[in-house]
Amino acid sequence: MIIGGFQKNSMIDYPGKIGSVVFTGGCNFHCPYCHNPSLVDGSYGELHESEIFNFLRKRVGLIEGVVLTGGEPTLHRDLPFLCSRIKNMGFSIKLDTNGSKPEIIKKMINSKCVDYFAMDIKTAPENYHTLTNEPDMAEKIISSVNLIIKSGIDYEFRITCAKTFIDKKNIKGILKVLEGSKRVYLQKLVRKKMLDEDYIKNEEDPDLENLKSIIEPYVLDCSIRS
Ligand code: SF4
């Protein structure tokens, strides 16, 4: 597993838990607003797993959960094994994913090595080709959403409201996939370091309250996350 970063303590990344955050290296998407460009362009420094395990061993009973985030963690085929090892130490596991690898998500559900999924929904399925060169991404995203909803494991879907990807038309496409789901968060685009620096200048904010009112009738809970 290529680990690109580690945050020892976090109060905000795992809902309701004190957590540590493991950042995996590499991503198969190219979101212009990405806040972790070094994890996408490969300029991150690599950490060895042993550094993380050494820290966690000393924090059993103090830290409650470990968040696997990226980059895109599911690109690493040994992710289920890593999560099982951490879970066996007594920590809860949250996986942040872009949903591009349903086969890994399925493996994690079957091996019961994850306690919480947070999947990003970038745009309507038919528009994912603007973020990645991988074919059949629309089908993969739909498959991941369905696996997570039916898994019996707690989850949230997160929508970063970047106007070129999220508008009234795209929201309709997204709702076809998310209809009936438990929890959807709308996130404002944060204007700080981005993969495409020009994107900060060009982008306007969509009306989040309006998007929320469109989504609310279709899901159990839709909230704006500040
Ligand atoms: S925002 Fe997430 S999915 Fe998009 S490029 Fe960055 S790490 Fe990858």
Image (cartoon, grey):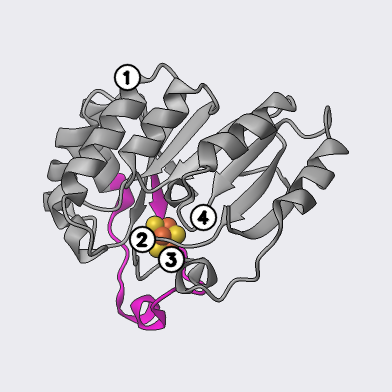
Mark 4 vs ligand 1: CB under 8 Å? yes
Query: In the rendered structure, are the residues bearing label 4 and label 1 in contact, judged by CB atoms less than 8 Å apart?
Result: no
Q: Position of residue 32 (x, y in %)?
A: 35, 71
**Spatial CA span between label 3 and label 2:** 12 Å
Tag 2's secondary structure? loop
Mark 2 sits on what residue? 28
Q: Residue at x 65, y 60 (%)?
A: 5
Mark 4 sits on what residue? 70
Q: Residue at x 31, y 73 (%)?
A: 203
Q: Label 4 is placed on what type of residue?
A: Gly
**Spatial CA span between label 1 and label 3:** 29 Å
Mark 1 sits on what residue? 150
Mark 2 vs ligand 1: CB under 8 Å? yes
Image position of 21 with respect to 46: above or below: above
Query: In the rendered structure, are the residues bearing label 2 and label 4 in contact, judged by CB atoms less than 8 Å apart?
Result: no
Q: Quadrant of residue 218?
A: top left
**Spatial CA span between label 3 and label 4:** 10 Å
Mark 3 sits on what residue? 34
Q: Nearer the viewer, residue 79 or 129?
A: 79
Q: Position of residue 81 (x, y in %)?
A: 57, 35
Instruction: Please tell me which of labels 2 and 4 falls first in the chain.
Output: 2
Q: Nearer the viewer, residue 60 or 178?
A: 60
**Is 86 displayed left or right of 134 in the figure?**
right
- Residue 5 part of the magenta-drawn span: no
Mark 3 vs ligand 1: CB under 8 Å? yes
Instruction: Please tell me which of labels 3 and 4 falls first in the chain.
Output: 3
Give the magenta part as a residue range.
186-209
Query: In the rendered structure, are the residues bearing label 3 and label 2 in contact, judged by CB atoms less than 8 Å apart?
Result: no
- Mark seen at residue 96: none
Query: In the rendered structure, are the residues bearing label 3 and label 4 in contact, judged by CB atoms less than 8 Å apart?
Result: no
